Every structure is written in structure tokens, then in C-alpha cells.
Amino acid sequence: MAQRFRGESVHKVDGKGRVSIPAQFRRVIEAGDPKWAEGLAPFVTIVYGGKQRDFLEAYTEEAIADVDARIERLPRGSKQRRAMEHFFNGQSLRMQIDDTGRLVLSQKLRDKIGISNEAYFLGSGDTFQIWSPDGFEDKNADIEEFLDSFGDDFDPLTLLEGTDAPAADAGE
């Protein structure tokens, strides 16, 4: 099983839009880039999406290749395929991480999600998200409310009931 993006952190964004990617995320990005080797800079694909997107979503090379393969299986010319191509190909950027572990977020991307001097990073399994700190709190307050509605003794794993759990790989 591939490594996963986990955790959250806030990082400074300088005037040129440079922001450090959390170190633990960089290891996942490297592992998810089949062409990466020590001394080379890995790539990610940043999907910024349309007006409905208030955050940026970063995919490793392997993760975006999986999305691309799934899009290619849709009927050519179908509205669903055209929408997916528009979203994942047209409204995205392939970016190289610099040798200090930073991404450069253009002014257009910063303006789109409301980032000024800080960016909030959130691990999301096979992707990670970049939000403005305020935007994240505003858009995700409902998740905390949802979890709070179960009470103090709530076990979040109960939300996974009914899903098939894959057998654990003894080698990991």
C-alpha cells in the first residue's frame, strides 16, 4: 500500500508565494513519484478546480496517474469525461518542488483560495489540501459539529462499519 498524507500544519507564505511543504508530506511525494531519485526534485499536480473549490489539492504522480486512467475509461466525448478532463487537466498545474522543499503558489492560486501570509496543509490520504487558515475553519466547522453530535464516548471507527477492511500487509 502506498504511503498516505497525514497530519496538519500551518506554514508561512512569502511575498513570492513560496511555501514549505510539511516534511512528512515530502516523503510521501517522493515515494509517489516513480521518476524521483535522491538529488532530484519530485513533482506534484495541484488541482485548483473551478469556483466551487476553496482549496488546492495536491496529487502525487502515482495518484494523478490513477485519476487519469479512470478518466480515460469514460466514454470519449461524454459530458462526464469532458467535465473530468476540464477539472483534472484544465484546472490543474504540474509543479516541481524546489530543493528546499517548497512550492511556489502563483498570485492567481493564492487569490483563488484567499491565502495571504499563511497556508494551512491538511493530509487527506492519497492527496493533501492547501487552504487559507480561515477558509479551512469556515468550510469545515460542520465536520466538527457532526463528530460532536455523537457525544464524548464516540469511537470514530464506527463510521467505517459496513466497509470491507483489506487484510493488513505483514511487511508494512
Image (cartoon, grey):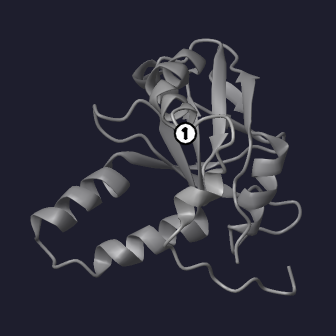
Q: Position of residue 58 (x, y in %)?
A: 56, 49
Q: Secondary structure at mark 1?
A: loop
Pick the front one: 120 or 50: 120
Q: Quadrant of residue 41?
A: bottom right
Pick the front one: 59 or 158: 158
Q: Is residue 29 left or right of residue 134?
A: right
Pick the front one: 73 or 97: 73
Residue found 36% across the figure and 55% down from its top: 88
Q: Inspect this view and state whether residue 74 appears.
A: yes
Q: Which kind of residue does numbered mark 1 sit on?
A: Phe
Q: Is residue 100 left or right of residue 15?
A: right
Query: Quick one: label 1, few (<14), some, or many (20+) residues within 10 Å?
Result: few
Q: Position of residue 57 (x, y in %)?
A: 51, 45
For the N terminus, the quadrant is bottom right
Q: Quadrant of residue 160?
A: bottom right
Residue found 85% across the figure and 79% down from its top: 172
Q: Position of residue 128 (x, y in %)?
A: 61, 47
Residue found 78% across the figure and 85% down from its top: 169
Q: Position of residue 10 (x, y in %)?
A: 73, 25
Q: Is residue 48 left or right of residue 132?
A: left
Q: Which residue is mark 1?
A: 150
